[in-house]
Image (cartoon, rainbow, N blue to C red):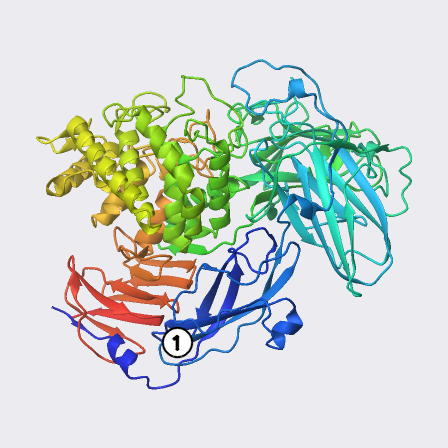
Amino acid sequence: MSKLVIFSWLYLLSIPLFAQDIKVAQLDCEYRNNPIGIDVLSPGLSWKLQSAKHNIMQTSYQIVVSSSLSNLNKNIWDVWDTKKVNAGQSLQIKYKGKKLLSGKTYYWKVRVWDNFGNESAWSASAFWQMGLLSTADWKGAKWIAYEKLTDSNVNSLPTDGKKDKFIGNNILPMFRKGFTVTKTIKKATVFISGLGHFEMSLNGAKVGDDFLAPGWTKYDKEALYLTYDLTKQLKKGENAIGVMLGNGFYYIPPVKERYRKLKVAYGYPKMICRLLIEYTDGTSANIISNQSWKTAPSPITFSSIYGGEDYNANLEQKGWNLAGFNDSKWKSSLLVDGPELNAQKEEPVKIFENFSPQNINALANGEWIYDMGQNASAIIELKVRGKKGDTVRITPAELLKADGSVTQKNIGSPSYFTYILKGDGLETWRPKFFYTGFRYLQVKGSVPGGKENPSNKSVIEALKALHIRNAAEQVGKFSSSNELFNKTFSLIDWAIKSNMVSVFTDCPHREKLGWLEELHLMGSSVRYNYNAAPLFKKALQDMKNSQLASGLIPEIAPEYVKFEWGGDMFRDSPEWGSSGILMPWYLYQWYGDKQAMVDYYPMMQRYITYLGTKANHRILSQGLGDWYDLGPKPPGVSQLTPMGVTGTAIYYYDLKILEKTATLLGKKADAIAYAKLAIEVKNAFNHKFFDAKSRQYATGSQTANAMAVYMELVEEKHKNAVIENLVKDIRDRKNSLTAGDIGYRYVLRVLEDAGKSDVIFDMNSRSDVPGYGMQLAKGATALTESWAALPTVSNNHFMLGHLMEWLYSGVGGIRQAENSIAFNHIKIEPEVVGDLTSADVRYNSPYGKISCKWEKTDRTFTLEVNVPVNTKATIYFPVLPKYEISEEYNSTFTDAGIEAGKVKVAVGSGYYKFNLKYK
């Protein structure tokens, strides 16, 4: 046995040798820092703590809320004062003060006490501003439009494959409203929604830095509005509001010449707006949308979320969104109906990385190919010079044909950008209401700057790709000594980023739909990388809005199309709809957010009841099964795993999660009922699928055996044998995978939990068989839809990126201990497997930054760990020959125990550096 040289946690807890400093470092309301537009009556408040010392735990806290910053600073806590609360909770504390008022800003701060009896200073002040809590709070604002879609042509849930009711393009309108401010402004806030999307300007300057606002929803149930602080943009005197509208998913124009995946038509574009102006004298005024607003067609002549966007610069009206513009030729706005409004809670979509072309190549037909080097969700930015009326058409694509031209065969065709020049020097254009996924751009009608131009075409001075995605904060970082893993991380991350907008989409081009299995299967991979909790909660609302009267949660949400190809298999698959049950629990596990379980418990109950009606002797066999597994045929519906295995396994898992949820919510009778039904499903599953002789499930596929183990369907006495059969199947295939969209995550989870990360390493360290390595070898820069990076399907797809989770939890060793909530008890157990010699992995958890950095040489192993304040960790050291362990900053004590052959130690918060040396 090796000798362990570490600090004594218990010793330091019992004898405080010096004062322990603690600081309240970050305050969040509903996951966001200083948010505006909160429409939750009892928002959740959280904070992070910092200390340079070790073993710091919060023991008490005090939250104070004031109606003004001056009151807060004067310690006049006129809204809420919790007094000193003896509790360690620092996440999701529900506000319980005075009733919150629409549009009102509240200021708050926190102080805490630690386990050494020290009191922190008050935190820096933070605030949140309420949104509009009732219809009356819109102060009479009306939905306005340029034109109205006739009721007979409204189609909120088109059936796939049905013919169009009518053909034609719609007007993309712009609106303006001039007004005068006569008093000194204290604060100005605008509450605005535009469907499908809007872009607002005030006095000619864009409001906000978001794109495709607001987020898209099931519009027959709700629409979202945004809140902006206009205090600095509004001025005393004459002002003007300008708004442009795009179609988005609210209306997909039925134009035959452009690509459409589906034919949803909720109505023509419309908007609603309330501008609240608060004056220093205590009075206020409201500018609201109504018939007094003027409207006219915009220079955007075509816009489709699928087919592209066209812009004619000759139709611009200079100064249209400035005060003093003559709008006498514009028409009055049309009053129309609109859906229920709720505040947008997720982060907006914004522009991030910019890509300039790596190569520009000429085609034989005189057109040009721009290679941006990265396949991403993006828009273009065009800078061009030319004559009035010159037309530039830019066609995006992921892949090229043999002749070097683009192909849209795998992403939907035709889809393109068109810009018609006004002939006024250097012209710069970006589309406002369309994005897609691409790496390549094919340019027609223009010539790159510096190239020969005998036909005197317009000249492109610059053409960039601007990556767009949800602005969720990046909270994870991964690097290792294995370059293939580093490239795989980037490959998966680009698919996550490209499909994280206001919905978690499957792909950023062909469909842009919220296929639900991704939420629970790829959820952990996303959460390690991005603080996307509000977006997951938004997905739950989309599921609730899309749930059928029967209780079915369809496979996509928001449900914009009813797929009938193959019967109901693309609408009713338990592995997809179960996100409605699993996501509230995962939000609680990862963020300590209990509210989602409270809010969506009825939806969860209705879905589990529906599944019960579909079960045949407790077996669920409908749907897609292990979608896109690797069988003898082209990928699609499950080939290697019989129908019924994955659906019933998920059904059982749903019941166990519902049992836990009901218990947590104090619904004992429900918990007992779900537990009883779960036993019946387990017995039926094992009776139908388990072969006691071979210790295999169903066909013995990787997916069948892994899911049986992960969901705890296999009896304990058979568990090891089933895992060994899983490993044997992988080894017999020369370490190659066969599991698909549903099964692969569970293969990885089971192998990691069983201490077999060496198998995971071997499976994912090759490029000669379908998998991440093959995708990279074929030139992919984002995760592809198929394991083999087939050119016939999407080459930027979200669904197979499950290895990301292992890169954090396995290579980085950052996991939650059993029964941990929001990483309050961390398990640090890096898997030192294969040829890995180092890794540096970080995750900014709800409590703060967790990091694990390790390096291995022939004679030493170094492990650096950071544990956030108010948490604890158990650290596991890799199995090595005889060695000694020292920790650089603490005293010498003995071993803390052994588990599965690994020495382990329990630690409190702080930074540690362990050095292992071979004897």
For mark 1, give the secondary structure: strand
Identify the amino acid type marked 1.
Asp
Q: Nearer the viewer, residue 596 or 386?
A: 596
* Left or right: residue 146 compared with residue 71: right
Q: Nearer the viewer, residue 267 or 911?
A: 267
* Left or right: residue 248 compared with residue 387: left
Pick out the residue farthest to the left.
693
Is 810 above or below relative to 390?
below
Q: Position of residue 903 (x, y in %)?
A: 19, 64
Is 265 above or below relative to 104?
above
Q: Nearer the viewer, residue 6 or 616?
A: 616
Q: Residue at x 33, y 71 (%)?
A: 912
Q: Residues within 10 Å of mark 1 (few under 14, many from 20)?
A: many
Q: Residue at x 55, y 25 (%)?
A: 408
Which quadrant would the C terminus be assigned to in this image? bottom left
Q: Residue at x 58, y 31 (%)?
A: 220
* Left or right: residue 164 compared with residue 94: right
Residue 525 in sight: no
Q: Position of residue 347 (x, y in %)?
A: 56, 49
Residue 908 in sight: yes
Q: Quadrant of residue 223?
A: top right
Is 232 above or below relative to 674?
below
Q: Quadrant of residue 606?
A: top left
Residue at image mark 1: 114
Q: Quadrant of residue 611?
A: top left
Which quadrant would the N terminus be assigned to in this image? bottom left
Q: Position of residue 156 (x, y in %)?
A: 58, 25
